[in-house]
Amino acid sequence: MEVPILKQGHYLIASIQSALSDNDLVQLRDSLVEQVGRQRSRGVIVDVTALDVMDSFATRTIRDITYMIRLRGAETVIVGIQPDVAFTMVQLGLKLEGVPTALDLEEGIAFLNKSAGPAGKDKNARGK
Amino acid sequence: MPVENEPKSAGRLVETSPASLENREKVIDETVVEIKNDLDIIAARQKGRALAGALEFSPSELTLIATTISELARNIVLYAKRGEVTLRWIERGGLRGIMVRASDRGPGIEDVHRVLQGGYSTSRSLGLGLSGVKRLMDEFEIDSKPGSGTRVTVRKWVKR
């Protein structure tokens, strides 16, 4: 199942709708890395609210997305990790080191407005 | 949360094989999921979550169990290409729980102890898989011979 990527001002929002296969995750990674250049985006939000499992592969791919997008000059924030998913990740020893996270979409946008450079000051990315 | 709807179990009683702890174990229900690709990983963990839900595990335990199944099924796809995941509703000595068994006829594991120490990986997985799974479950058995495949069996009991 493909993940829809929405463009909102200087940001891209990838909103995961259901369980993703390994191939879906890799496809999401590649299209975000490509689109961040095509759309000249400054920030990316990956919304994982709908994910009921974040195993080692998902965790690693999310981390890869963040690092690759950073190398492309933009900032990523992961939003919506569910309490039980957070619990399991900690139990399994799965880490998202160097990956910014926020509670939900609203907090994710607020984070990017502060951290994703000049985008925070223009009309397309009005902060609070 | 997207969980597959499973038909209610028929509650049939299956005789267990006389190996290790299994001869003292009643099998109330069994589902076998064939694993050939990454989509089967999702199918296996959704079926496992549904079974664990029927067993009345807590929500965070459901996530633990689904994640465990995901790791075990992925090991099959990565190392053996194909195999199967068996999910059982089990009872033993007044306890009820879930048994998850991942079996394949793949290359097997050369050094089981090293794999269980964690941080070990021969392929593109994180190497956290088996050691992490061992930590999450109540019982963990691994049976592997180089050249003839791997069988990992885990059990988790419902807390009373």
Image (cartoon, helix red, strand yellow):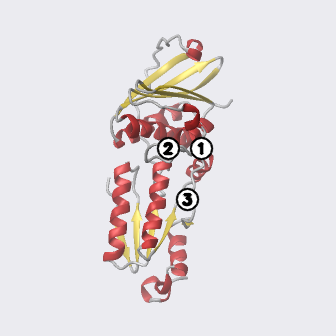
Which of the two residues, A58 or A78, is positioned nearer the viewer here?
Answer: A58
Disc 2: which chain? B
| Number of numbered tags placed on the structure image | 3
- Between the C-alphas of marks 1 and 3, the distance is 20 Å
Q: Nearer the viewer, mark 1 or mark 3?
A: 3
* Mark linked to residue A118: none
Whether residue A25 sits left or right of residue B136 in the image: it is left
The residue that label 2 is drawn on is: B121
Image side of residue B113 versus residue A126, left or right: right
Residue drawn at (45%, 61%) of the image: A64
Question: Residue flagged by tag 3: what amino acid is it?
Answer: Leu
Q: Report whether residue B43 is seen.
A: no
Question: Mark 2 belongs to which amino acid?
Answer: Ser
Mark-to-mark CA distance, 1 and 2: 27 Å
Task: Say which residue appears at 56% left-offset and 65% top-offset.
Answer: A98
Give the quarter of the figure containing the C terminus of chain A.
bottom right
What whole-number distance in Å separates the C-alpha atoms at marks 2 and 3?
Answer: 19 Å
Please state which amino acid type lies under the numbered disc 1. Ser
Q: How far from the left and from the top, in percent, is residue B154?
A: 55, 29
Q: Residue furthest right?
A: B160
Q: Which mark is residue A96?
A: 3
The residue where tag 1 is placed is B60
Rendered view: A12 above or below B136: below
**Chain letter of the residue beneath label 1 in the structure image:** B
